[in-house]
Amino acid sequence: MDNIAGQNSGGRVAVNITVLVLVLLWLLPTVGLFVSSFRDRDQISNSGWWLAPMAVDLNFRTRVATDGAREEGGVFVLEGNVFADPALAANFPDGAGVVAAYGTRAVAPTEFVAGEVSELRGGGNLVVNRDGSYRIEAPEALDRGPTLYFEARTPPKFTLANYQTVLFADGMDRAFINTLTVTIPATIIPILIAAFAAYALAWMDFPGRGLLIAAVVGLLVVPLQLALVPLLRLHTDIGIGQSFVGIWLAHTGFGLPLAVYLLRNYMAGLPRDIIESARVDGATDFQIFIRIILPLSFPALASFAIFQFLWTWNDLLVAKVFLPSGADTQVMTVKIADDLLGSRGGDWGILATAAFVSIAVPLAVFFTMQRYLVRGLLAGSVK
Amino acid sequence: MSPVLQGILTIIIGVGGCVGYFYGSNLLLDKVIFPARGANIGRNINRANQVRPWLFLFPAVFALGVYLAYPVVGSFYRSLFDRSGANFIGLGNYVDLFNEGTFRVAVFNNLLWVLVVPALATFFGLLIAQLTDRLRWGNIAKSLIFMPMAISFVGASLIWRFVYSANPDIGIINALRDAMGLAVLDPLQVQFWNNFFLMFILVWIQTGFAMVILSAALRGIPEETIEAAIIDGANPFQVFFKIKVPQIMGTIVVVWTTITILVLKVFDIVYTMTGGNFGTHILPSYMMTYMFRDDGRATAVAFVIMLLVLPVMIWNIRQARAEMR
C-alpha cells in the first residue's frame, strides 16, 4: 500500500511494465554478447544479433563448369544449378536454396534480380532463376566458365567454432589458467592475515586501536594508481620483479583494508557472552579465535572471499603492471584488452566468445553465492 | 617451475606460513618470553596480553604499510623527480601537467564522471529498489540488474561494443538509426557526448550495487512512519520523497561516496573503448599513458587522483570514528 503506484491495479501494471523494461534494458547488451558468441562468422557481419534466429542474406560465388555445354540452334548453351557447387555444400547441405539476386562482377555481386536476363561480357546472355538454376547462351563455345556471384538466404547457423578457436587456437586457454593462478592464492592468503587482525581490532584492548581502525578506513579509499610505481620499483629492488609472486603480494596488500574492515565489523557484532565465557573458562585468545570466532565468522569470510575473487579475476590494472606482458603470463583481461582487440578487432565472433569465456566464471560465482555477496555489501556500507 | 605448481606451492606456503606464524608466535610468547609460571606469573600474563594484539596485527599492519601507506609517500616523493629519477625538479612535473591540454581535458572529464556516474547510478538504484520492493518477481529482477557487478570492466566494454559499434549490423544504436533512415555514425567519436556514452557503461555496472544497498535500507524504514503518513493523506510520491528518502539519506550518501571513489580509480573502460582518443581521457587512463615511460609524470598524475580522493577519505574516517563512540 505504500508503493509509489501500488494503490490501483493500473498503477501496479505500470510498475510491472517499468521494471520489465528496465530489466530488459539492463540485460540486452549481455544477451547480445552471448548470442553473438555462438553465431557463424559470416552471419555476424551481415545481420545484427537480434536477427540471429532469422535467415541471413549472404553473398556467394561459384565458377560455372564448361563441360556440360551443348549446341542448340547455333548457340552454345550451358545449364546447371548454382547450389550444386560442392564448394558451397557447407552452406547448402541439401543442394537447394533461394537466390535473391545475382551478378557477374565481384564489385556488383547483386546487380540483377533473380530471373532477369542479363548480357554476358564477351557476348551472349545469362539468367539465374530463384531456384538456383542458370542458363547461359553464348554465340561460341566458352573455354572458361564465367564466375557467378549470387545472394542467397541462408538458414540461421549457430556454431561452437568460435569457442574452439578462442579456447584452443588463440591462447585463451593459457590466459584462463593464468587468471586462475593469479586469483586463487590472491583470494586465500589475505583472508587469514585479515582475520587475525580483525579479531585483534574487534575484541582485544590495546592503546591505539581506534587510530588503527581509522587508518584502515582511510586506506580503504587510497587509489591503486599511487601504488603502482613505488611498488614495482620495490619489487624490482628485492628481486621479485614482474612475476606471479609479485602480483599475489600486490593483490594481498590491496585487498587487506576491505578484508580487515568487513571482518572487524562482523566480528564486533558477535555476542560478547560467548567470548567472555570462553575467557572465563581459561581459553587463550588464540584458542578463542580458532575455535569460536573463525567458525562463527564464516558468512563474512565468504563474502570477502567472493569480493576478492571477483576483483582479482576482473582486474586489468594490477595485472598489466605487476605481470610481464608475454603470452605465458597474460591473464584474460589483458589478453582481451591488449591482444585480441588489436589483432582480432573486426572479428566480432571471436571477441564475443573471448569476453564470454572471461565472464562465465564470475557469473557462475555470482549467481551461486549472491547471498553472501549481498550480505558483505550490506556489512560494508549500511549501519 | 610451472606457474600452476608455483601457485599451489604459494597457497601452501602462504596459508601454512600464516598459521605457523600465529601459532608459533603465540606459543613463543606464552611459553618462553613471558611464561605463565614461576615468580612473576601475574606480571607475565599481563605483559603477554599487552603484546599479543600486536602479534595478531603485525602481518596485516606490515602489508598495509608496505602496499598502501608507503606508496602514498613514495609516489609523492618520486613525482618530484624527473623522468630518469636522478634530478630533483620540485613541482616541475605538476607544472608541466597543468600546461598540457590533454591533462586539462582529463581533469575536466574526470570531474564530469565524478558528477554524473554516482548521480545516475544512485538514481537508477533507488528507482529500481523502490519499484521492485513489493513486486512478486522483484528478487529475480534485482538479481538480473545486479549481475553486471560480476562482469569485468573489460568484459563490460566488449559487451557495450555491441551497442555502440559504428557497424549497423553489430551496434544496436546504429541499427536503430539505420532503420529510421539516419546516417550511421560512431557514437564514440562524437566529441564531448562520447564521455557520457562511456560513463553509461559504469552506471550500468554500478546501479546494481546502489540498488542492493538502498533496497535493504528501504526495508529497514519503520512501517509506522509510512502508515502515519498515509493516514494523514499523503500520496505515494509524497510518501516516497518526504518520508522514505529523508530516512535513508545516510545510506544514499554512503552509496554516493563509494561510487565516487570507484569512479576515480576505473581506467579499464576508457582504455578498452577509446584508448583515450576523441577527447575521452580521464586521469586514471591518462596516467597509464605515462606508466613505464615516465615515472615522474605517472606518479604526479596518481598524486592528483589522491588529492581528489582526499576529502572523501577524511569524511569516511570521521564517520567511522563517530560511529565507534
Image (cartoon, rainbow, N blue to C red):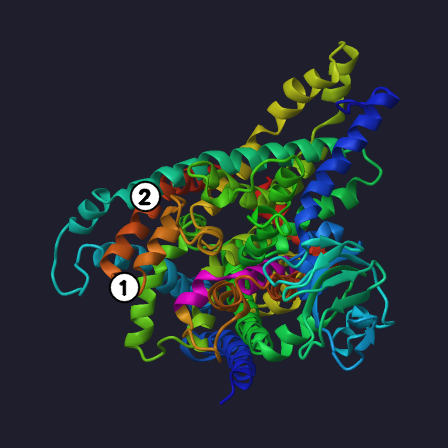
Q: Is residue B309 left or right of residue A349?
A: left
Q: Amino acid at mark 2?
A: Leu
Q: Which residue is mark 1?
A: B293
Query: Does residue B46 appear in this view?
Result: no
Q: Residue at x 58, y 53 (%)?
A: B156
Q: Residue at x 50, y 73 (%)?
A: B22
Q: Nearer the viewer, residue A313 or A32?
A: A32
Q: Which residue is mark 2?
A: B307
Q: Residues within 10 Å of mark 2 (few under 14, many from 20)?
A: few
Outermost residue to the front: A74
**Mark sitting earlier along the chain (1/2):** 1
Residue B86, how many percent across, how many down? 13, 65
Q: Dot 1 falls on which chain? A: B
Q: Nearer the viewer, mark 1 or mark 2?
A: 1
Residue A230, how many percent across, how many down? 30, 64
**A314 shown above or below B95:** below
How many discs appear? 2
Query: Does residue B141 appear in this view?
Result: yes
Magenta region: which residues?
A301-321
**Magenta segment, prevailing SS (helix, strand or loop):** helix
Residue B237, how many percent across, how many down? 70, 18
Q: Is residue B274 left or right of residue A62?
A: left
Q: Nearer the viewer, residue A142 or B246?
A: A142
Q: Residue at x 46, y 34 (%)?
A: B115
